[in-house]
Amino acid sequence: MPLFQYKAIDASGKFITGSLDAGNSNDLELRLEKMEMDLVTFKQKDLGTDLFGRNKIGRRDLINFSFYLEQLTRAGVPILEGLADLRDGEENPTFRDIITGLIEAIEGGNSFSQALNLYPKIFDDVFVSLIRVGERSGRMSVVLVDITETLKWQDELMAKAKKIMMYPSVIGTLVLSVIMFMMIFVVPDIMGAIVSLGGKIPFETRLLMATSNFLINYWYIVIATPFAIFFTLKYFYSTSTKARFRLDGLMLKLPIVGPVNEKIKISRFTRYFSLMFASGITVLDAINLSKGVLSNSVLEDGIDRAWQQISEGSSISEAFKNIGIFPPLVVRMLRVGESSGQMDKSLDNVSYFFDRDINDSIEKMEPVLQTSLMATIGIIVLWLALSVLGPIYDTISTIDF
C-alpha cells in the first residue's frame, strides 16, 4: 500500500504533518477523518528511492525476489504466503516495506500485477506486464524463470562494463591528480630555475609555464568545470526533448564506447521482446512495452517508426530493416522466423547473436581503452620531459669547456 506524506489540521486548528499508508487519496482522507483531522495537502512517498531520488532497490534484490518467488510458486505455495516468506527473510528494510505493501494491496482485493503496479520505480511496465501474462495463462512460475534469467543477464552485462571502465577511470583520475599537483607545486620552482639560466625558452616550455600559471590561478575552475558541465547537461536532458534527443544520439556516436552501448540497448530490447512475444503478448504490445528498456530517445524513435509500419501491415523483418538499427543478419533471422512460423525461436536466436556480439566487443574494447590511456599518459610525460630537460640541455650545450 502506498505511503503518503500529509499535512492536516486537527480540531484545535493546529497543523500536523506526518506519513500514513493508504490505498489512494480518498482512503487517506477517510483515515485522517477517523483521527479527527482534515487533510490539507498530501504527497505520495516512493519507498524505492532515497532523498536524492536514487533507487535503493538494486537489480540483485529483484533477482532474488523473482527467483525465490518462482521456487515457491513452482512448489504450489500461494502468492500471498510466498510474499510473506520473502518479507520475513528480506534483509533490505526498504524492500521489506515494499513487499509488505504488496501483501496489503493483494489482501485489499488487488491482483499481484496490480499490486506491483503501485511501485513503478521498482517494477517497470515490462515486469508488470509479464506477471499479468503469468496470471492469465496460469504459467506464473515459467514467467518468473524468464524474468530471473533476463535480470541475471543484465546484471552480468553491467558487471562486465563496470569492470572494464573501472581501470581507466581509476588510473586516469590518479594520473591527472599527480599531474595537477606537479603543475601547481613542482613545475613553478623548476621553471624559475630554467628562466634563471638565461637561455632561450622553447615553445613547449612556455606552454608548460602557461598551463602551470593557469592551474595555480584558476584551479577551482578546472575542478568545478566537469561538475558544471555534468549538471547542465543533466538539466537540459531532463527538461528539453530536443536536447535529450541530441545527447542520446551523441552517446551512440562516441568512439569505442558508442557502438557497444548501442548493441547493449538493442540486445535488451530484443531479449524483452522475445520474452513477451513467447509469453503470448501481441506483437504491437510487446514492441511498445519493450521499447521502454532502451532508455535512448533516438533508438525509441526508430522503434516507434517500426511499430507504426507494423501496425499499417508491414512485416516485423521489413519494419526493422527500414529503421536501419538492426544488422542484416538479424533481419534475415526475423524473416526466417516469419516464413517458418517460429518467430519465438528466431527472436531467441537474435538475442543470442547480440549476446555474443556484445561479449566480443567488450573483450576487444578493454585492451583498446588501456592502450589509449597508456598512450595519453606517455604523451603527457614526454611533454613534461621535453619542457624541463630541453632548455637545460640547450644551456649546457652552449657552455665552452
Image (cartoon, grey):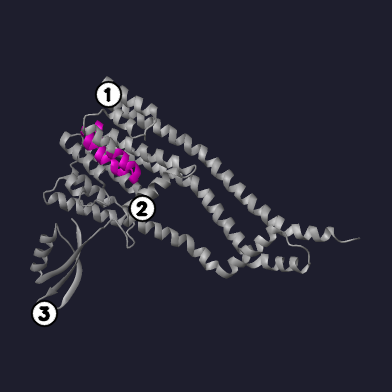
Left or right: residue 61 versus residue 359 is left
**Which circle marks residue 243 in the picture?**
2
Q: Position of residue 370 (x, y in %)?
A: 56, 45
Vertical side of 81 occupied by 136: above or below: above
Residue at left offset 8%, top offset 68%: 33
Q: Nearer the viewer, mark 3 or mark 1?
A: 1
Image disc number at residue 12: 3
C-beta proximity under 8 Å, tags 3 and 1: no
For marks 3 and 1, give the CA distance: 71 Å
Q: Quadrant of residue 356?
A: top left
The C terminus appears in which quarter of the rendering? bottom right
* Residue 361 location (% of width, % of height): 47, 36
Q: Earlier in the sequence, mark 3 or mark 1?
A: 3
Q: Secondary structure at mark 3?
A: loop
| Residue type, numbered disc 2 | Ala
Please give the range of residues in magenta: 276-304
For this rendering, which residue is in front, 228 or 136? Answer: 228
User: Residue 78, relative to residue 337: is it above or below?
Assistant: below
Whether residue 233 is situated above or below residue 34 in the rendered picture: above
What's the residue at 63%, 53% (across, down)? 380
